[in-house]
Image (cartoon, rainbow, N blue to C red):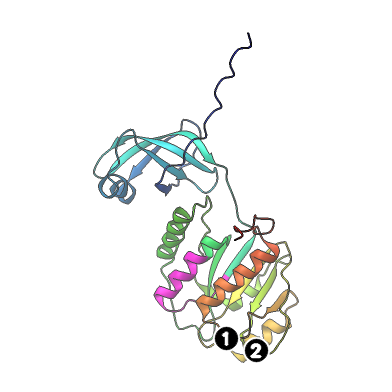
Amino acid sequence: MTPACPPAAQPVPRPRVRLYVEQALGQGQPVSLEDAQAHYLFAVMRMGPGDMVALFDGKNGEWAAEITESGKRRGRALCRSQTAAQGNPPDLWLIFAPIKKARTDFIVEKATELGAARICPVQTDFTKAERIRRDRLQAHAVEAAEQCGGTYVPPVDDLRPLSALLANWPKDRLLYWGDETLAGRGITPATPTPGPAAILIGPEGGFSSAERARLAALPFVRPLALGPRILRADTAAVAAITLWQSAAGDWQGQPAGLQP
Protein backbone atom coordinates (compact mmCIF):
# COMPACT_ATOMS: atom_id res chain seq x y z
CA MET A 1 0.00 0.00 0.00
CA THR A 2 1.40 3.35 -1.04
CA PRO A 3 1.91 5.59 2.00
CA ALA A 4 -0.04 8.80 2.02
CA CYS A 5 1.89 11.89 1.03
CA PRO A 6 2.47 14.32 3.88
CA PRO A 7 0.46 17.53 3.59
CA ALA A 8 2.25 20.35 1.80
CA ALA A 9 3.78 22.97 4.03
CA GLN A 10 1.63 26.03 4.28
CA PRO A 11 3.26 29.42 3.65
CA VAL A 12 3.78 31.51 6.75
CA PRO A 13 1.22 34.32 6.76
CA ARG A 14 2.67 37.81 6.88
CA PRO A 15 1.65 39.70 10.02
CA ARG A 16 -0.56 42.72 9.45
CA VAL A 17 1.62 45.12 11.47
CA ARG A 18 5.08 46.00 10.09
CA LEU A 19 7.90 47.86 11.83
CA TYR A 20 11.38 48.95 10.81
CA VAL A 21 14.07 48.20 13.39
CA GLU A 22 17.76 49.05 13.44
CA GLN A 23 18.85 45.72 14.91
CA ALA A 24 20.13 43.06 12.51
CA LEU A 25 17.49 40.36 12.04
CA GLY A 26 17.85 36.60 11.60
CA GLN A 27 16.48 33.25 12.69
CA GLY A 28 15.97 33.20 16.46
CA GLN A 29 17.20 36.78 16.88
CA PRO A 30 15.69 38.61 19.90
CA VAL A 31 14.69 42.21 19.21
CA SER A 32 14.16 45.02 21.70
CA LEU A 33 11.12 47.25 21.19
CA GLU A 34 11.20 50.60 22.95
CA ASP A 35 9.49 53.98 23.24
CA ALA A 36 7.35 54.83 20.18
CA GLN A 37 7.36 51.28 18.79
CA ALA A 38 6.30 49.76 22.11
CA HIS A 39 3.57 52.37 22.53
CA TYR A 40 2.26 51.71 19.02
CA LEU A 41 2.20 47.93 19.39
CA PHE A 42 0.92 47.62 22.94
CA ALA A 43 -1.20 50.75 23.52
CA VAL A 44 -2.47 51.58 20.02
CA MET A 45 -2.71 48.16 18.35
CA ARG A 46 -3.46 46.31 21.63
CA MET A 47 -0.96 43.57 20.86
CA GLY A 48 0.75 41.42 23.45
CA PRO A 49 2.79 38.27 24.08
CA GLY A 50 2.06 35.59 21.50
CA ASP A 51 1.05 38.04 18.77
CA MET A 52 3.12 38.23 15.58
CA VAL A 53 4.62 41.38 14.06
CA ALA A 54 6.56 41.81 10.81
CA LEU A 55 10.02 43.35 11.30
CA PHE A 56 12.57 44.51 8.74
CA ASP A 57 15.97 46.13 9.14
CA GLY A 58 16.66 47.30 5.58
CA LYS A 59 19.31 44.60 5.00
CA ASN A 60 18.00 41.14 5.89
CA GLY A 61 14.47 41.03 4.51
CA GLU A 62 11.27 40.81 6.52
CA TRP A 63 10.79 38.51 9.49
CA ALA A 64 7.72 37.30 11.37
CA ALA A 65 8.54 37.89 15.02
CA GLU A 66 6.61 36.75 18.06
CA ILE A 67 6.12 39.26 20.84
CA THR A 68 7.53 37.70 24.01
CA GLU A 69 7.35 40.65 26.43
CA SER A 70 5.22 43.79 26.51
CA GLY A 71 5.24 46.87 28.71
CA LYS A 72 4.33 50.53 28.69
CA ARG A 73 7.62 51.69 27.18
CA ARG A 74 9.45 48.56 26.12
CA GLY A 75 9.03 45.04 24.95
CA ARG A 76 10.75 42.18 23.19
CA ALA A 77 10.11 40.02 20.15
CA LEU A 78 11.76 36.90 18.74
CA CYS A 79 12.30 36.30 15.00
CA ARG A 80 10.57 33.06 14.01
CA SER A 81 10.71 32.89 10.20
CA GLN A 82 11.57 35.03 7.20
CA THR A 83 8.46 36.17 5.32
CA ALA A 84 10.15 38.16 2.54
CA ALA A 85 13.65 38.29 1.10
CA GLN A 86 15.57 41.53 1.03
CA GLY A 87 14.54 43.65 -1.94
CA ASN A 88 16.76 46.63 -2.72
CA PRO A 89 15.64 49.23 -5.27
CA PRO A 90 17.64 50.19 -8.37
CA ASP A 91 20.52 52.62 -7.89
CA LEU A 92 18.40 55.74 -8.37
CA TRP A 93 18.80 58.97 -6.42
CA LEU A 94 16.14 61.65 -6.13
CA ILE A 95 17.60 65.15 -5.88
CA PHE A 96 15.08 67.87 -5.12
CA ALA A 97 14.80 71.39 -3.76
CA PRO A 98 12.65 71.45 -0.59
CA ILE A 99 9.35 73.29 -0.92
CA LYS A 100 6.53 73.74 1.57
CA LYS A 101 6.64 71.35 4.53
CA ALA A 102 3.67 69.14 3.60
CA ARG A 103 4.78 68.88 -0.04
CA THR A 104 8.35 68.06 0.93
CA ASP A 105 6.99 65.30 3.17
CA PHE A 106 4.95 64.04 0.20
CA ILE A 107 8.04 63.93 -2.04
CA VAL A 108 10.00 61.85 0.50
CA GLU A 109 7.11 59.46 1.09
CA LYS A 110 6.39 58.89 -2.60
CA ALA A 111 10.06 58.57 -3.52
CA THR A 112 10.33 55.77 -0.94
CA GLU A 113 7.21 54.02 -2.23
CA LEU A 114 8.30 54.31 -5.86
CA GLY A 115 11.76 52.87 -5.22
CA ALA A 116 14.38 55.59 -4.81
CA ALA A 117 17.62 54.34 -3.28
CA ARG A 118 18.72 57.71 -1.89
CA ILE A 119 17.00 61.06 -1.29
CA CYS A 120 19.10 64.23 -1.58
CA PRO A 121 17.60 67.62 -0.66
CA VAL A 122 19.53 70.50 -2.29
CA GLN A 123 19.64 74.28 -2.00
CA THR A 124 19.20 76.02 -5.35
CA ASP A 125 19.13 79.71 -6.24
CA PHE A 126 15.34 79.83 -5.92
CA THR A 127 14.93 77.44 -2.98
CA LYS A 128 12.90 79.15 -0.26
CA ALA A 129 13.62 76.66 2.52
CA GLU A 130 16.93 77.42 4.21
CA ARG A 131 16.95 74.34 6.43
CA ILE A 132 15.23 71.00 6.82
CA ARG A 133 14.68 68.53 9.64
CA ARG A 134 16.55 65.60 8.20
CA ASP A 135 15.51 63.34 11.09
CA ARG A 136 11.84 64.12 10.47
CA LEU A 137 12.14 63.41 6.74
CA GLN A 138 13.97 60.16 7.51
CA ALA A 139 11.11 59.18 9.78
CA HIS A 140 8.69 59.80 6.90
CA ALA A 141 10.79 57.48 4.72
CA VAL A 142 10.66 54.78 7.40
CA GLU A 143 6.88 55.11 7.75
CA ALA A 144 6.42 54.93 3.98
CA ALA A 145 8.51 51.73 3.78
CA GLU A 146 6.49 50.19 6.60
CA GLN A 147 3.22 51.00 4.83
CA CYS A 148 4.15 49.94 1.29
CA GLY A 149 5.62 46.54 2.15
CA GLY A 150 9.17 47.46 1.21
CA THR A 151 12.21 46.03 2.96
CA TYR A 152 14.53 48.97 2.19
CA VAL A 153 14.55 52.50 3.64
CA PRO A 154 16.35 55.11 1.51
CA PRO A 155 18.70 57.39 3.44
CA VAL A 156 17.76 61.07 3.44
CA ASP A 157 20.81 63.34 3.16
CA ASP A 158 21.37 66.67 4.87
CA LEU A 159 20.50 69.74 2.83
CA ARG A 160 23.45 71.00 0.78
CA PRO A 161 24.02 73.37 -2.15
CA LEU A 162 23.31 71.94 -5.59
CA SER A 163 26.62 73.38 -6.77
CA ALA A 164 28.51 71.32 -4.16
CA LEU A 165 26.74 68.14 -5.19
CA LEU A 166 27.52 68.72 -8.88
CA ALA A 167 31.16 69.53 -8.13
CA ASN A 168 31.70 66.05 -6.67
CA TRP A 169 29.47 64.10 -9.04
CA PRO A 170 30.38 60.41 -9.60
CA LYS A 171 31.51 59.87 -13.19
CA ASP A 172 29.42 56.76 -13.83
CA ARG A 173 26.04 58.23 -12.80
CA LEU A 174 23.70 59.95 -15.27
CA LEU A 175 21.65 62.90 -14.05
CA TYR A 176 18.18 63.35 -15.53
CA TRP A 177 17.24 66.99 -15.15
CA GLY A 178 13.53 67.81 -15.02
CA ASP A 179 13.65 70.86 -17.28
CA GLU A 180 10.33 72.71 -17.00
CA THR A 181 11.07 74.82 -20.10
CA LEU A 182 10.66 71.71 -22.29
CA ALA A 183 6.95 71.43 -21.42
CA GLY A 184 4.70 71.79 -24.44
CA ARG A 185 7.53 72.11 -26.94
CA GLY A 186 7.02 68.71 -28.52
CA ILE A 187 10.52 67.58 -27.58
CA THR A 188 11.06 63.84 -27.27
CA PRO A 189 12.13 63.16 -23.68
CA ALA A 190 15.43 61.51 -22.89
CA THR A 191 15.00 57.75 -22.61
CA PRO A 192 16.29 56.51 -19.25
CA THR A 193 18.82 53.69 -19.46
CA PRO A 194 19.73 51.10 -16.79
CA GLY A 195 22.63 51.88 -14.51
CA PRO A 196 23.41 54.35 -11.73
CA ALA A 197 21.19 57.38 -12.18
CA ALA A 198 19.71 60.40 -10.46
CA ILE A 199 16.71 62.65 -11.06
CA LEU A 200 16.89 66.38 -10.38
CA ILE A 201 13.70 68.33 -9.61
CA GLY A 202 13.83 72.07 -9.05
CA PRO A 203 11.91 74.33 -6.65
CA GLU A 204 8.83 76.43 -7.26
CA GLY A 205 9.99 78.94 -9.84
CA GLY A 206 12.40 76.50 -11.47
CA PHE A 207 16.13 76.97 -11.95
CA SER A 208 18.01 80.23 -12.37
CA SER A 209 19.65 81.09 -15.69
CA ALA A 210 23.08 80.42 -14.18
CA GLU A 211 22.01 76.99 -12.94
CA ARG A 212 20.45 76.17 -16.29
CA ALA A 213 23.65 77.11 -18.12
CA ARG A 214 25.77 74.97 -15.81
CA LEU A 215 23.47 71.95 -16.08
CA ALA A 216 23.33 72.21 -19.87
CA ALA A 217 27.15 72.18 -20.05
CA LEU A 218 27.69 69.07 -17.91
CA PRO A 219 28.35 65.88 -19.92
CA PHE A 220 26.50 63.58 -17.51
CA VAL A 221 23.24 65.60 -17.55
CA ARG A 222 20.26 64.56 -19.69
CA PRO A 223 17.33 67.03 -19.93
CA LEU A 224 14.06 65.27 -19.17
CA ALA A 225 10.70 66.46 -20.52
CA LEU A 226 7.72 65.53 -18.34
CA GLY A 227 4.82 66.09 -20.69
CA PRO A 228 2.97 69.03 -22.25
CA ARG A 229 2.23 70.84 -18.97
CA ILE A 230 4.44 72.44 -16.32
CA LEU A 231 4.16 70.29 -13.19
CA ARG A 232 4.37 71.28 -9.57
CA ALA A 233 7.62 70.16 -7.96
CA ASP A 234 6.00 67.34 -5.97
CA THR A 235 4.08 66.10 -9.02
CA ALA A 236 7.22 66.30 -11.16
CA ALA A 237 9.17 64.14 -8.70
CA VAL A 238 6.53 61.41 -8.84
CA ALA A 239 6.25 61.62 -12.65
CA ALA A 240 10.02 61.49 -13.19
CA ILE A 241 10.60 58.49 -10.90
CA THR A 242 7.68 56.67 -12.54
CA LEU A 243 9.11 57.36 -16.00
CA TRP A 244 12.57 56.12 -15.02
CA GLN A 245 11.33 53.04 -13.18
CA SER A 246 9.09 51.96 -16.06
CA ALA A 247 11.87 52.40 -18.63
CA ALA A 248 15.04 51.39 -16.77
CA GLY A 249 14.15 50.31 -13.24
CA ASP A 250 12.65 47.35 -11.43
CA TRP A 251 9.16 47.84 -12.84
CA GLN A 252 10.22 46.18 -16.09
CA GLY A 253 8.99 42.64 -16.48
CA GLN A 254 6.39 42.98 -13.73
CA PRO A 255 3.05 41.32 -14.50
CA ALA A 256 0.45 43.60 -16.02
CA GLY A 257 -2.72 44.49 -14.17
CA LEU A 258 -5.84 42.41 -14.55
CA GLN A 259 -7.49 42.81 -17.94
CA PRO A 260 -11.25 43.26 -18.20
Q: Which residue is drawn at 52% across and 61% down?
A: 112
How far from the left and from the top, in percent, is residue 74? 29, 42
Q: How crowded is mark 1: few (under 14 residues within 10 Å), some or many (20 or more)?
A: some
Q: Is the magenta stretch mostly helix, strand or loop?
A: helix
Query: Front-most of 249 and 72?
Result: 249
The answer to whether 45 appears left or right of 218 in the picture is left
Q: Is residue 32 depicted above or below 151 in this figure? A: above
Q: Residue at x 71, y 76 (%)?
A: 221
Q: Is residue 73 magenta?
A: no
C-alpha separation, residue under disc 1 versus residue under disc 2: 8 Å
Q: Earlier in the sequence, mark 1 or mark 2?
A: 2
Residue that carries the numbered disc 2 in the rendered image? 184
The magenta segment is 95-110
How far from the left and from the top, in percent, is residue 39? 28, 48
Whether residue 203 appears in this view of the structure is yes
Q: Quadrant of residue 75?
A: top left
Whether residue 158 appears in this view of the structure is no
Query: Front-most of 117 and 226?
Result: 226
Q: Which amino acid does label 2 sit on?
A: Gly
Query: Front-most of 164 and 152?
Result: 152
